[in-house]
Amino acid sequence: MTAETIKSTTQGPIATVRIERPESMNAFTYPMIAAIRDAVDAAANDPAVGAIVITGLGRAFSAGLDMTTLSNTAEGQRDTRQPPPSELPALFGFLLDVPKPVVAAVNGVAAGGGMVLAMMCDLRFAADTASFTTAFSKRGLIAEHGTAWLLPRLLGTSRALDLLWSARRIDAEEAYRMGFVDRLVPADQLIDETNRYLTELLATAAPRSIATIKRQVYAGWSQTFAESTIEMSRVLAASLDHPDLKEGVASFVERRPPNFAPVGTDDRHASPSTLVLSDNDLIL
């Protein structure tokens, strides 16, 4: 099933991971979740890839965990695999550790685990036909997979409680007004607009800057302002000696596109929940 339902393609510097199980609204099975991880890991470790897009085929981004799998889980048949100790246990939490931009191109319904997948991406571009629901409370579940921590930070406490308590469906326009969606796009332009944004970003921004800023932002959620600014000072000091700075200045002075080095596997670090940048980790 996984080879047929998770497709990964690369066009230029952008890798696209597409969930292709439209007859089941792209609902996840455990092997599919593992296949998404494998596809993202391959793109993250490919120096030719600068950014990753995750999307779905058909009228759904993903309806979450497959109902047969969920029913088996309710009967005690559960996935007992555990993530490495250094990694967040939340579903798709590994996306926060990818040193490249990961953008959800939400083409349709994102429910339960599908909304979690969109939430764990760095940005969310949504078709105007998309919709979102947490779904958990209506299944007798809790705020799963980091939603109790992430959603209040994205939306504010009361809006997060509303969506988690009621599990009501919100359309793309409301999700955009709340701040969950970053770009609202006509459905037939979703992938083109997502790729256009990333192409421009990758043509102008240093990959190591992108990776380091991503680490700074996610680590900063668990830091005090003082801790964050002290860490920023150390990262900044290292960046001043990095070749990217010289190239960034030279490209500006010479009025030409910059030629930054790609981000490498050394730029992948522990998950943001445990991340502490040492002097040896200061790469910009």
Image (cartoon, rainbow, N blue to C red):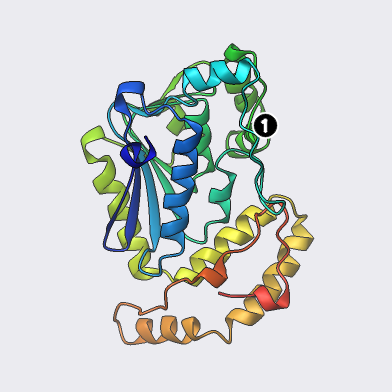
36 w.r.t. 12: above or below: above
Residue at the image position 44 percent from the left and 26 percent from the top: 174
Residue at the image position 33 percent from the left and 58 percent from the top: 14
Label 1's element? Answer: helix
Q: Which residue is mark 1?
A: 148
Judge whether residue 180 can be spotted in this image. Answer: no
Judge whether residue 41 can be spotted in this image. Answer: yes
- The reply, left or right, for residue 254 in relation to residue 161 is left
Q: Position of residue 168 (x, y in %)?
A: 51, 15
Report the quarter where the N terminus lies.
Answer: top left
Quarter of the rendering containing residue 106 = top left
Residue at the image position 70 percent from the left and 68 percent from the top: 277
Report the quarter where the C terminus lies.
Answer: bottom right
**Callout 1, which amino acid?**
Ala
User: Number of marks in the image?
Assistant: 1
Q: Which residue occupies the foreground of this view, 35 or 284?
A: 35
Q: Position of residue 248 (x, y in %)?
A: 43, 80
Q: Position of residue 262 (x, y in %)?
A: 42, 73
126 w.r.t. 15: above or below: above
Residue at the image position 52 percent from the left and 57 percent from the top: 98
Q: Which residue occupies the foreground of this view, 70 or 76?
A: 76
Q: Position of residue 156 (x, y in %)?
A: 63, 33
Q: Residues within 10 Å of mark 1 (few under 14, many from 20)?
A: some
Q: Which residue occupies the foreground of this view, 230 or 280?
A: 280
